Every structure is written in C-alpha cells, then in structure tokens.
C-alpha cells in the first residue's frame, strides 16, 4: 500500500486527538481517502475488521469496524470504522470517541 506509514501515522494522531478531547467536545472525525484502499491493507495497520450490519436499509453504505481499536472496559479511546465503496474498498474512515 502506497503511503502506508503516512496513513498509519495520520490515523494514530487523529485517534489520539479524538480520545483526548473532553467529553462532548469532539465526537468523531471523518477522513475521506484520496484513493480507495483494500480492507486488508488497513487491517495491517489497525488489526482485524468485521463488517457491521447496514444502518437502515440494504442501500445504506457498508461499514467495517477495526476491533482492536475499540477501547477496553473502563477506558476512553477512539474506535475506527471504515465506509466501503461499491467495490468493497475503503473510501473513508470514521474515528469515533468511545467510552466504556
């Protein structure tokens, strides 16, 4: 994957910023990728992903969640989800503040 190190650094910086934000200040960040990436490329950076149920209808965007990014019980962190394009490639990332 071209620019994998840059992408990994950017994702970790954004996760840290979202996780550090005071509750309610920054809930999530959406990143539109300049070119789609295979889910497997991002799994090398973020760990295993699984596909989430579609939000409202079969025409809703497909999303995957990178499970290793979910904070543990009692922690605050930033979970990474990816939206897939029609070809099943990652077109954008959602980095969401989660507290369990």
Image (tube, helix red, strand yellow):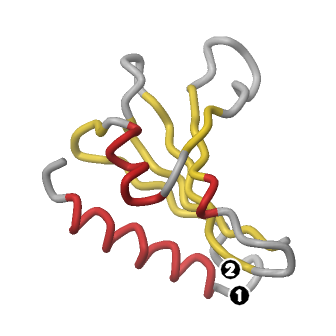
Numbered label attached to residue 25: 2
Residue that extends furthest to the left in the rendered view of this protein? 2
User: x and y percent of residue 95 in the render?
Assistant: 55, 61
Q: Nearer the viewer, residue 39 or 60?
A: 39
Give me the residue at 38% from left, 59% from top: 45
Give me the residue at 40% from left, 67% from top: 11
Q: In this view, does 47 lie above or below 10?
A: above
Residue located beneath label 1 in the image: 22
- Count of numbered tags: 2
Crowding at dot 1, Cα within 10 Å, few <14 / some 14-19 / many 20+, comes out as few
Q: How far apart are marks 1 and 2 (CA)?
A: 5 Å
From the viewer's perspective, is 24 left or right of 32?
Answer: right
Give me the residue at 62% from left, 21% from top: 60
Numbered label attached to residue 73: none
Crowding at dot 2, Cα within 10 Å, few <14 / some 14-19 / many 20+, comes out as few
Q: Nearer the viewer, residue 38 or 94?
A: 38
Placement of the C terminus among the 4 image quadrants: bottom right
Give me the residue at 56% from left, 57% from top: 80
User: x and y percent of residue 14 in the render?
Assistant: 45, 73
Question: For the residue labelled by badge 1, is the local secondary structure a helix, a strand or a loop?
Answer: loop
Badges 1 and 2: C-beta atoms under 8 Å apart? yes
From the viewer's perspective, is 82 left or right of 19?
Answer: left
Q: In this view, does 33 lie above or below 74?
A: above
From the viewer's perspective, is 89 left or right of 83?
Answer: left
Residue 59 position by quadrant? top right
User: x and y percent of residue 73 in the render?
Assistant: 85, 73
Q: In this view, does 24 lie above or below 28?
A: below
Question: For the residue labelled by badge 2, is the local secondary structure a helix, a strand or a loop?
Answer: loop
User: x and y percent of residue 35 in the render?
Assistant: 22, 40
């Amino acid at each position: 994957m071209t620019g994998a190190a840059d992408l990994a650094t950017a994702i970790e910086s954004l996760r840290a910023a979202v996780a550090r934000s005071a509750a309610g200040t920054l809930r999530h960040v959406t990143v539109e990728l300049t070119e789609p990436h295979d889910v497997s490329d991002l799994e090398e950076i973020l760990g295993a992903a699984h596909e989430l149920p579609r939000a409202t209808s079969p025409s809703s965007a497909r999303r995957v969640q990178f499970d290793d990014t979910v904070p543990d019980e009692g922690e605050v962190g930033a979970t990474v989800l990816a939206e897939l394009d029609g070809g099943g490639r990652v077109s954008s990332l959602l980095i969401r503040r989660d507290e369990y």
